[in-house]
Amino acid sequence: MAGIGPLTQDWEPIVIRKKAPSAAVKKDEKVLILSWEIAANAGTNRAASSSTSLNTRKLDEDTENLAHDRVPTELKKAIMQARMDKKLTQAQLAQMINEKPQIIHEYESGKAIPNQQIIGKLERALGAKLRGKK
């Protein structure tokens, strides 16, 4: 700020030059271009026809059962029996363990996915052992 008069802005463009790219940078650019070409051909069946058949065969041979575990019959009967012994409704039991009544209904109907925390709460509230050997 050595000026005496009003401040003015310099609108001249400034060009900053980099040094010439090295061989490693050029190689990285070639890899980037190749990966871009592969991505551009991703929607077509040109290059990937052989690997697709291998993946398809693996999927066809896969017979794994992907269903979730459900509440066992012994557990749902034990919950119902312990609740009836205490003369509680599903809603009252749900309130005791701070869960929704729908949770108790799902456990007693066998539709719930077993959660050890909820089963532990049920054991404490009902005063009965629901899991393991009796």
Image: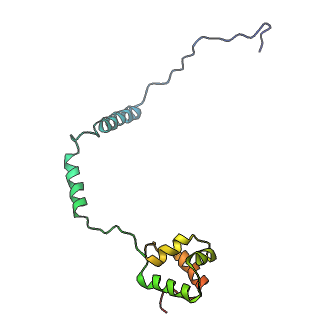
* 86 sits left or right of 131 in the view: right
Identify the residue at image location x=20%, y=52%. Answer: 53
Residue 99 position within the rendered picture, expressed as x and y whole percent measured from the top left: 58, 71
Return the residue found at the far right.
4
Q: Is residue 25 above or below residue 131?
A: above
Residue 35 position within the rendered picture, expressed as x and y whole percent measured from the top left: 33, 38
Q: Is residue 1 above or below residue 101?
A: above
Which sits in the foreground, 21 or 33? 33
Identify the residue at image location x=41%, y=74%. Answer: 70
Which sits in the foreground, 123 or 3? 123
* Quadrant of the image occupied by residue 109: bottom left
Residue 75 position within the rendered picture, expressed as x and y whole percent measured from the top left: 46, 83
Whether residue 5 is visible here, answered yes or no, is yes
**In which quadrant will I find the N terminus?**
top right
Q: Is residue 70 above or below residue 48?
A: below
* Quadrant of the image occupied by residue 91: bottom right
Residue 36 position within the rendered picture, expressed as x and y whole percent measured from the top left: 34, 35
Return the residue found at the far bottom.
134
Q: How many marks?
A: 0
Which sits in the foreground, 43 or 83? 83
Identify the residue at image location x=20%, y=58%. Answer: 57
* 39 sits left or right of 74 in the view: left
